[in-house]
Amino acid sequence: MIICHCTKISDHDIHSAIDWMRASDPQTIITPGKIYRALGKKADCGGCMTLFLDTMRSNAKVSVPAHLQNLRTAISSESEYEGRPQSHRVSQQST
């Protein structure tokens, strides 16, 4: 099935590129841009991006490596103020 009509990329091309990238570097993060580059093409209008991403997600080898998952830390209420506690300001007192 043709995924991108502008650059004539099929679902088979996307899956082949993912398989090739995963075989050459098991730790790589696979993105649409990397797939376009692996195929020697550039994105044109972007109208296919939803279908392109759905095709990528359907490949079992596109997942993020386990040691790179869940790297974000939970956001606490204090982190809303650039990492400083809310009481970082000196109170203004009249003299």
Image: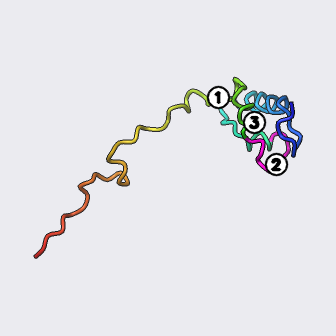
Find out whether residue 15 is within the magenta segment: no
Q: Determine the residue positioned at 28% across, 51% down.
A: 85
The residue under the point 70% across, 39% down is 31
Q: Is residue 95 left or right of residue 90?
A: left
Q: Residue furthest right?
A: 8
The residue that mark 1 highlights is 63
Q: Position of residue 77 (x, y in %)?
A: 33, 45
Disc on the earlier residue, 3 or 1:
3
Question: As drawn, is 59 to the left or to the right of 81?
Answer: right
Quarter of the image holding residue 22? Answer: top right
The mark closer to the camera, 2 or 3, is 3
User: For the residue labelled by badge 3, is the local secondary structure a helix, a strand or a loop?
Assistant: helix
Question: Reading the chain from its start, which is encountered first: label 1 or label 2?
Answer: 2
- The answer to whether 86 appears left or right of 60 in the picture is left
Q: Given the image, on which type of amino acid does mark 3 rest?
A: Leu
> In which quadrant of the rendered image does the N terminus lie?
top right
Q: Mark 2 = which residue?
A: 42
